Amino acid sequence: MVVLFLILFGSSSTVTLIDNIISGNMAGVYAGYSNGEGGGVYFGSSKTAILINNTISDNEANHGGGVWLAVHGTADIYNNIIWNNRARESGNDLYIGNGNNNLNLFNNDFDQSGSHITNPIFVDPSNLNNLDPLFDEDYHLQAGSPCIDAGDNSATLLPTTDQDGNPRIVNSIVDIGAYELQVPANSHVQFSAADYSINENGNTVTITVTRSGGSQEGQSTLNYATTSGTATSGSDYTQTTGTLSWADGDSADKTFTIAIIDDGKSEGDETFTITLTDPISGENLDNAAVTITDEDTTLVTLVEFIVMALEENEIIIEWQTATEFNNAGYYLWRAIWKESDFSNVVRLTGIAPKGDFSVYSYIDTSVEAGITYYYGLEDIDLNGQSTFHWDLIDSATAR
């Protein structure tokens, strides 16, 4: 709930205001002491004034619509939003009669040209000049506010919580004003895709990480790391970890690369995972999968492939495997060599797999005596991809 009140301070040693919302007030004559000064806050004759992380907005006075300050000691004014206040005569947001006091004015958002400082000082560039803080109706900062991550962490008596009781520093730098935006800078960081693919002989895969929001989210840092799945680090890819960082306002994509190892083995497609995490909390921010596509020529390794003629118009085809990975089965192909070309090419019946180091045989009975037949082997993986072992074609002449 928005707190609406007017504060008047007389002589005292130290006056402190931290994490307050001061809004909707109008200053008039107060016991003959205030002549319509300090619509939101009136400091009079204090030795020390401390204003830290307050939101002072929509107030009105003759002088100092937001804050009227006459301090004869030290004034520490840090991380305040003093904005959209109105002075009928001078000092819309600030009216400072600083005399000989030590004025520390840093990381505030106020109307610099419309404010009044009796003894002019150099306004530190850490202060925002009347930038719209992008409030909601309760003065909470909204996404894109220039006040996000724009404060000073070394401010005097910096609170650990905001006006709502939430953590005061969500990212690395405190916000300006009474409320801290509770959206971490890393909340809009993610991989550019949920799945990446790279051929086993592709050497490296480039991973892109995107960040939306830009300046609304201040500085952002995250860690990335790979985790083995069916693809194993050290044999299929190189274990990779690192850190990516964005400056305030930086929404450019960041990339990193992962080395892929071509082991020359027929293993089928394999997958590993990449993860983004918060470097402080360890929170998992996003995951993606990387698939290494096996480009090797076969998933089946043959020891031998032999074709022999039997009696009575039969030809036997035998083969033995050393390895069978992801194998769904086999087809035999048969052709007749005629006039320098193959003809009558047919795909014979399918044969179920048995596993590594297996011996297979098939008897072809649909042959004619005196004709030479050539045979080749096709294996099918579980994804439906075929591999033809044409380097092991063998033949026999039917009897």
Image (cartoon, grey):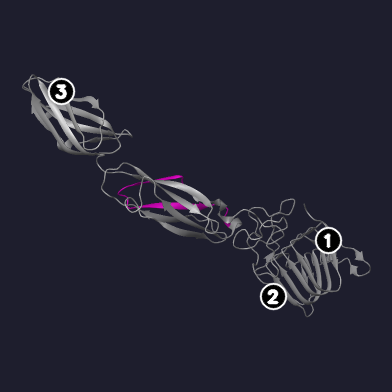
Amino acid of disc 2: Phe
Point out residue 344 in the picture as x, y percentages from the top left corner. Answer: 16, 23
Q: Examine the rendering and report whether any part of residue 307 can be seen.
A: yes
Mark found first going from the N terminus, 2 or 1: 1
Pointers 3 and 2 in contact (C-beta within 8 Å) = no
Crowding at dot 3, Cα within 10 Å, few <14 / some 14-19 / many 20+, comes out as some
Q: Quadrant of residue 368?
A: top left
Q: Which mark is residue 45?
A: none
Q: Examine the rendering and report whether any part of residue 192 can be seen.
A: no
Q: Which of 373 and 357 is in front in this view?
A: 357
Q: Quadrant of residue 325?
A: top left
The residue wearing badge 2 is 122
- The Cα atoms of the two marked residues, 2 and 1, are separated by 26 Å
Mark found first going from the N terminus, 3 or 2: 2
The residue wearing badge 1 is 60
The residue wearing badge 3 is 364
- The Cα atoms of the two marked residues, 3 and 2, are separated by 99 Å
Amino acid of disc 3: Asp
Point out residue 357 in the picture as x, y percentages from the top left corner. Answer: 21, 37
Q: Give the range drawn in magenta.
A: 192-214
Q: Is residue 193 magenta?
A: yes
Amino acid of disc 1: Glu
Q: Is mark 1 on a helix, strand or loop?
A: strand
Point out residue 230 in the picture as x, y percentages from the top left corner. Answer: 36, 45
From the viewer's perspective, tell me whether residue 55 is left or right of residue 274.
right
Q: Is mark 2 on a helix, strand or loop?
A: loop
